[in-house]
Image: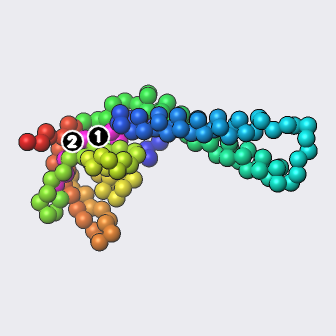
């Protein structure tokens, strides 16, 4: 995104921490199969191919673990989201051409259970990055161009 550490929401942090725990558990399971082989027995080519596949899987898991660990470390030193400009972690309200208004939080990770979360790499999320209250943005949708106006940045208004 911007190349500087960006904050993440508590929900995104929990999701990353869970994914990290899952990857570590999977990595431990793969490592146990790698360490469990008898190094003195030559084995056949199928055993060697299986060993290479497990080693490749371990390397893939290690890369994922390193990436998530790095992202969590960066988020820990990032400043809190700004209250005047939309960025990762910001809450804001936008109005659409059809007159509807919606409040969102801009996040890094999609969560199908959180309808108020908009990802920064979505067309609307990307268009909103760096904008302030009163700004209009245009973005592409599957059915053509659309527009929205930033109503407010900061805590979304409470419903009701």
Few, some or many C-alpha atoms within 10 Å of disc 1 (few <14, some 14-19, many ≥20)?
Answer: many
Side of 138 relative to 79 (left or right): left
Is residue 44 visible to us here? yes
In magenta stretch: residue 126: no
Determine the image quadrant of residue 155: top left
**Distance from label 2 to label 1 (Cα)?**
7 Å
Local secondary structure at mark 2: strand
- Identify the residue at horizontal 29%, vertical 72% (top origin): 143
Local secondary structure at mark 1: loop
Determine the image quadrant of residue 78: top left
Q: Position of residue 75 (x, y in %)?
A: 43, 32
- Residue designated by label 2: 153
Side of 16 relative to 57 (left or right): left
Q: Position of residue 2 (x, y in %)?
A: 43, 44
Mark seen at residue 42: none
Quadrant containing the C terminus in the rendered view: top left
Residues drawn in magenta: 88-95
Is residue 86 visible to us here? no
Mark 2 or 1, nearer chain start: 1
- Residue designated by label 1: 90
Few, some or many C-alpha atoms within 10 Å of disc 2 (few <14, some 14-19, many ≥20)?
Answer: many
* Label 2–label 1 contact, CB within 8 A: yes
Q: Nearer the viewer, residue 149 or 63?
A: 63
């Amino acid at each position: 995104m911007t190349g500087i550490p960006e904050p993440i929401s508590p929900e995104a942090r929990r999701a990353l921490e869970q994914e990290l725990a899952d990857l570590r558990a999977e990595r431990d399971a793969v490592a146990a199969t790698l360490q469990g082989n008898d190094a003195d027995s030559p084995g056949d080519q199928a055993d060697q191919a299986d060993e290479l596949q497990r080693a490749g899987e371990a390397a893939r898991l290690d890369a994922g673990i390193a990436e998530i660990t790095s992202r969590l470390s960066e988020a820990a030193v990032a400043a809190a989201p700004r209250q005047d400009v939309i960025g990762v972690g910001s809450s804001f309200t936008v109005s659409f051409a059809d007159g509807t208004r919606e409040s969102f939080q801009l996040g890094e990770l999609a969560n199908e259970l959180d309808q108020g979360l908009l990802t920064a790499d979505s067309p609307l999320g990307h268009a909103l990055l760096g904008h302030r209250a009163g700004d209009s943005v245009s973005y592409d949708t599957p059915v053509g161009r659309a527009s929205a106006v930033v109503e407010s940045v900061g805590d979304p208004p409470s419903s009701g």
